[in-house]
Image (tube, grey):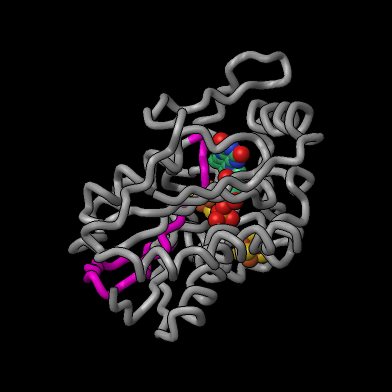
């Protein structure tokens, strides 16, 4: 198989998934002796349509939200990308709880778009809602595991024509299950659908970074205190605010975050790698 470019593609509000797919694309491009390219679709300004050929190797990543592809990112996946049998590696990053059906869903979506998905990975990365979950991950041990997985890819690509690459199977996870239902500390359903971040006026200097970093384009550039559109709770505005001015005060959301920390904080979750 003649791969001329390894392309990393991702939706990544707080950067974990972008780090993973870029790392993988760089390593694979080195191993295959070809170019690499990055295509982000996190921010409204960077979203555009792309088609891929059989000479592109695509590393396609999304974060896990409620055990699935973030539901607001799914329309972008479906509308922006097309492939003509391009070999693809599906990647999800998750924050120490579970990745549930996300990888299966991503594989299915990419297959429907014309990709030949032959490999996949569910990778642990620091939880974007609580830095104490999977803190410091991926660490050196994780990267060694990623490298071991990546080292098997070139051999696979040499052994098969793109259309003959064995399709990715996910034993025990072939079915896409409903979204995980977030719980609060009382183990009841936590309803924080309408929660939006607030701004500490005494800290904010109206630099506009949060508005630029919001994947939903929901923060007003002129008045960053105003969050007029949909909020997916991605935490990008909080992470990237240089003044620490953005925060959530919604009690249900905070209770859910504490619930996850209590139940999954002690876990050391694993990376999972699959090859068709
Ligand atoms: C709204 C939301 C839902 C999440 N749901 C899950 C989940 O179901 N399981 C899990 O382990 N981590 C979950 N996480 C953590 C993210 O999957 C993880 O931090 C991911 O690496 C973030 O990717 P990004 O930095 O590319 O945005 C969630 C994070 C957010 C913001
Ligand atoms: S990034 Fe922070 S300081 Fe800048 S406008 Fe947004 S809230 Fe204000
Ligand atoms: S307003 Fe909501 S969707 Fe926008 S960056 Fe902040 S948390 Fe993410």
Can the viewer see residue 244 in this picture?
Answer: yes
> What residue appears at the point 69 percent right and 57 percent down from the top-left corner?
142
Seen from the viewer's position, the closer of residues 196 and 191 is: 191
Quadrant of ligand 2 in image: bottom right
> What residue appears at the point 65 percent right and 35 percent down from the top-left corner?
97
Q: Is residue 271 left or right of residue 67?
A: right
Q: How many marks?
A: 0
Q: Is residue 48 magenta?
A: yes
Seen from the viewer's position, the closer of residues 110 and 57 is: 57
Query: Looking at the picture, how far across and down is residue 126, in whole percent?
Result: 69, 51
Q: Quadrant location of residue 253?
A: top right
Seen from the viewer's position, the closer of residues 250 and 106 is: 106
The residue stretch that appears in magenta: 43-67
Can the viewer see residue 218 in this picture?
Answer: no
Query: Looking at the picture, how far across and down is residue 229, in whole percent?
Result: 42, 47
Q: Quadrant location of residue 41?
A: bottom left
Q: Is residue 152 left or right of residue 2?
A: right
Query: Looking at the picture, how far across and down is residue 47, in whole percent?
Result: 33, 65
Q: Is residue 236 magenta?
A: no
Q: Is residue 91 left or right of residue 261?
A: left
> What residue appears at the point 37 percent right and 28 percent down from the top-left corner?
175
Name of the residue lying farthest toward the left: 84
> What residue appears at the point 40 percent right and 85 percent down from the top-left corner?
34
Q: Is residue 41 left or right of residue 13?
A: left
Does residue 261 sit above or below 3 in this rendering?
above
Query: Looking at the picture, how far across and down is residue 203, in whole percent?
Result: 75, 61
Seen from the viewer's position, the closer of residues 7 and 200 is: 7
């Amino acid at each position: 198989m003649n791969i001329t470019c390894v392309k990393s593609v991702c939706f990544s509000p707080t950067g974990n998934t972008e780090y993973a797919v870029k790392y993988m694309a760089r390593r694979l491009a080195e191993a295959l002796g070809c170019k690499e390219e990055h295509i982000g679709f996190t921010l409204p300004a960077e979203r555009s349509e792309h088609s891929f050929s059989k000479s592109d190797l695509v590393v396609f990543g999304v974060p896990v939200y409620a055990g699935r592809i973030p539901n607001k990112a799914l329309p972008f996946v479906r509308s922006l990308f097309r492939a003509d049998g391009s070999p693809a590696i599906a990647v999800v990053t998750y924050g120490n709880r579970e990745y549930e059906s996300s990888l299966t869903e991503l594989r299915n979506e990419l297959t429907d778009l014309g990709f030949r998905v032959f490999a996949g990975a569910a990778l642990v990365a620091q939880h974007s809602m609580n830095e104490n979950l999977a803190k410091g991950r991926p660490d050196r041990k994780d990267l060694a595991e990623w490298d071991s997985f990546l080292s098997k890819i070139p051999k696979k690509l040499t052994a098969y024509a793109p259309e003959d690459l064995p399709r990715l199977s996910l034993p025990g996870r072939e079915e896409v299950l409903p979204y995980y239902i977030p719980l609060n500390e009382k183990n009841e359903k936590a309803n924080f659908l309408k929660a939006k971040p607030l701004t500490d006026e005494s800290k904010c200097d109206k630099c506009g970074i949060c508005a630029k970093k919001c994947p939903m384009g929901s923060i007003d550039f002129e008045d960053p205190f105003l969050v007029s559109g949909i909020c997916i709770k991605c935490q990008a505005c909080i992470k990237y605010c240089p003044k620490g001015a953005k925060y959530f005060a919604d009690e249900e959301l905070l209770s859910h975050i504490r619930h996850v920390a209590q139940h999954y904080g002690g876990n050391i979750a694993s990376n999972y790698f699959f090859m068709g």
